[in-house]
Amino acid sequence: MKFYADTPGRRGRQLFADVGFVIWCVVWIWLAVRFYEVVLLLGAPGAAIESAGTALESNMVSAGEAIDGLPVVGESVRGPFDRMSEAGLGIADAGRAQQDAVARVAMVSATLLALGPIATLAVLWLPLRVRFIRRINASQRLLDRSLDLDLFALRALARQPVTVLAEVAPDPMAAWRDGDEAVTRALAELELRDEGLRIPSPSSA
């Protein structure tokens, strides 16, 4: 399985693009994490409210238990302390709810912050890479199976600009039909180079 071209120039550009995409992802993920941490700071008031509510609830429970131990008046006086304890518990719950809401907003916002730029670049980069990988491996399989350059020479005759073909031979089509190995090899080299493959050496063929 080939992932990169054999030709140095194209392989270098592909490596540069792939590394650039990874760096792009890392940068945006880092920014998203930092943004998440900053947004979480908005939950500080909620933490303070929770702490105050918990302290109030604990103090009122302790005070109620102490009052409850007094003879005669204990039970009749404890009621307000119990209600204040319940109020403290409600305040603590409100503080926790506020922190949870901030955490959800922070998570969604940070995810969108990273996902947007990464997905935008991936839509441009990924199809090109997948298309190239499929093409170069298909061409490599054809080349490995037969080592016959005629197919690639014929594709070059159909696809390459006329000015490029004229540099190979005055009449490249006629030369290819006549079985001219040098012209066939030169034509195949044009096509294989466009696919990112090196032409096999004569000894390999």
Image (cartoon, helix red, strand yellow):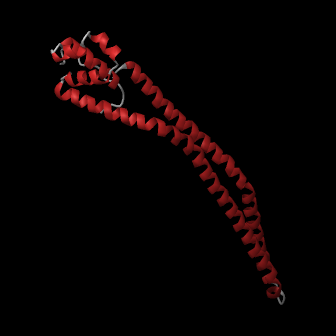
Q: State the image coordinates of residue 38 (x, y, percent, origin top left).
A: 68, 46
Image quadrant where residue 102 sits: bottom right
Q: Quadrant of the N terminus?
A: top left
93 and 19: which one is in front?
19
Percent from the top left, x then y, of residue 198?
29, 20
- Above or below for 162 versus 93: above
**Residue 17 horizontal side relative to residue 43, left or right:** left
- Tell me: residue 136, above or below residue 55: above
Q: Does residue 43 sit above or below 194 in this rendering?
A: below
Left or right, residue 46 beside residue 183 = right
Q: Nearer the viewer, residue 90 or 21?
A: 21
**Residue at point 57% right, 36% down?**
27
The answer to whether residue 201 is seen in the rendering is: no
Which sits in the foreground, 203 or 84? 203
- Residue sticking out furthest to the left: 178
Closer to the camera in the image, 76 or 95: 95
Look at the image and tell me in which quarter the C terminus lies.
top left
Q: Residue visible at 27% across and 29% down?
A: 139
The reply, left or right, for residue 5 in relation to residue 182 is right
Quadrant of res 165: top left
Relative side of 195 to 54, left or right:
left
Give the x, y percent position of residue 48. Answer: 75, 59
**Which residue: 78% across, 74% down?**
60
Residue 51 shows up from this direction: yes
Query: Residue 143 at x, y = what percent?
Result: 22, 26
Residue in the picture at 64% in, 43% down: 34
* Tally of numbered tags: 0
